[in-house]
Amino acid sequence: MRYGLVKWVLLILGAFLMYQNRYKLLNLILGMKLLRTIAIRGFLRIPGIRDKMVQDMF
């Protein structure tokens, strides 16, 4: 019982801290070439985002 409560509190606290520092985390992730490449490839696999980006580029 206690373990489950502690787990949920830590999960909520972690999510709150990540949300508060989301731009710092994004800059950290996109500052690394390998992770930036993986992130861009991941976003381009989503049809709606890919179509919007291709439409804006050309």
Image: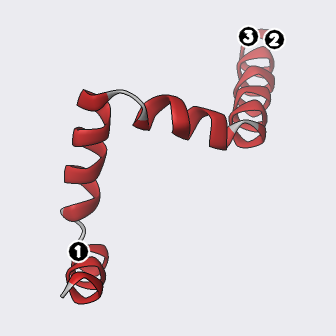
Residue at left offset 76%, top offset 33%:
12
Element on which disc 2 rests: helix
Question: Height in image: 48 above or below 44?
Answer: below
Marks 3/2 in contact by CB < 8 Å: the verdict is yes
> Residue 47, percent across and down?
21, 76
Q: Nearer the viewer, residue 42 or 27?
A: 27
In this figure, which residue is indicated by the disc labeled 2? 2
Residue at left offset 27%, top offset 51%:
40
In this figure, which residue is indicated by the disc labeled 1? 50
Q: Quadrant of residue 29?
A: top left
Question: Height in image: 15 above or below 50?
Answer: above
> Residue 41, percent across and down?
19, 51
For residue 36, the mark is none
Indicate the amino acid at tag 2: Arg
- Neighbor class of circle 1 (other Cα within 10 Å; few <14, some 14-19, many 20+) is some
Q: Nearer the viewer, mark 1 or mark 2?
A: 1
